[in-house]
């Protein structure tokens, strides 16, 4: 926390926001929580810093890998803390970075939670694992599908407000 607080003057001087992210660790016995994996801990970090230049970037896939439902974490943290989302899907065991709606996460419920908390921040794909499956010639088609999937999710969020 003291390290982050030392960054405040630089963030203010240069007009940038610093986003902390929920992370996990891979250990010999499997996946373990990293910093901010627990939403109560994440809330404490953001609340203790209490500075508009610090915010939370909630990685929805990391929620799933650490055994948490992203929709519950969204509701626990709220839009007053979260101003950035990393959007991707995985199998709950490996951080696959796949396109939403293609693996195991409950996207209808996640969209509902995003709408409920009144989220207004960024919607950033972290779905490079999805693209890795395609040849260079097919990438434009895959990117179009990613775009259409994102628009579908945003529409789903808007319809739930």
Image: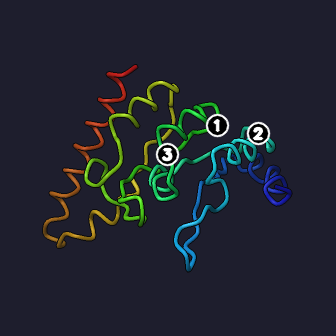
Please report whichever mark, 2 or 3, sits nearer to the chain's N-terminal start. 2
User: 115 or 17, which lies in front?
Assistant: 115
- Looking at the image, the residue that sits furthest to the bottom is 28
Q: Residues within 10 Å of mark 2 (few under 14, many from 20)?
A: few
Residue 9 lies left or right of residue 52; in this view the side is right
Judging by the rendered image, the residue that carries numbered circle 2 is: 47
- Give x and y (percent) for residue 135: 17, 73
User: 142 or 95, which lies in front?
Assistant: 95
Tag 2 and tag 3, C-beta contact below 8 Å: no
Real-space Cα distance between discs 1 and 2? 8 Å
- Give x and y (percent) for residue 100: 31, 49
Residue 33 against residue 104 in the figure, above or below = below
Judging by the rendered image, the residue that carries numbered circle 3 is: 85
Task: Name the colouring of the figure.
Answer: rainbow
Residue 40 against residue 78 in the figure, above or below = below
User: 161 or 52, which lies in front?
Assistant: 161
Q: What residue is at 76 percent from the left and 46 percent from the top?
A: 12
Q: How many marks?
A: 3
- Looking at the image, the residue that sits furthest to the front is 29
Q: What residue is at 45 percent from the left and 32 percent from the top?
A: 114
């Amino acid at each position: 926390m003291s390290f982050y607080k030392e960054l405040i003057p630089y963030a203010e001087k240069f007009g940038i926001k610093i986003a902390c992210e929920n992370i996990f660790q891979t250990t010999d016995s499997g996946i373990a929580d990293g910093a901010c994996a627990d939403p109560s801990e994440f809330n404490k970090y953001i609340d203790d810093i209490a500075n508009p230049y610090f915010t939370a970037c909630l990685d929805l896939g990391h929620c799933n890998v650490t055994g948490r439902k992203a929709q519950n974490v969204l509701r626990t943290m709220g839009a007053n803390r979260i101003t950035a989302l990393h959007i991707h899907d995985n199998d709950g065991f490996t951080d696959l970075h796949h396109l939403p709606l293609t693996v195991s996460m409950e996207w209808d419920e996640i969209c509902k939670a995003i709408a409920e908390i009144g989220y207004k921040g960024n919607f950033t794909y972290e779905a490079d694992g999805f693209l890795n499956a395609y040849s260079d010639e097919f990438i434009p088609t895959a990117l179009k599908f990613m775009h259409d999937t994102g628009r579908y999710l945003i529409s789903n969020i808007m319809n739930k407000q």
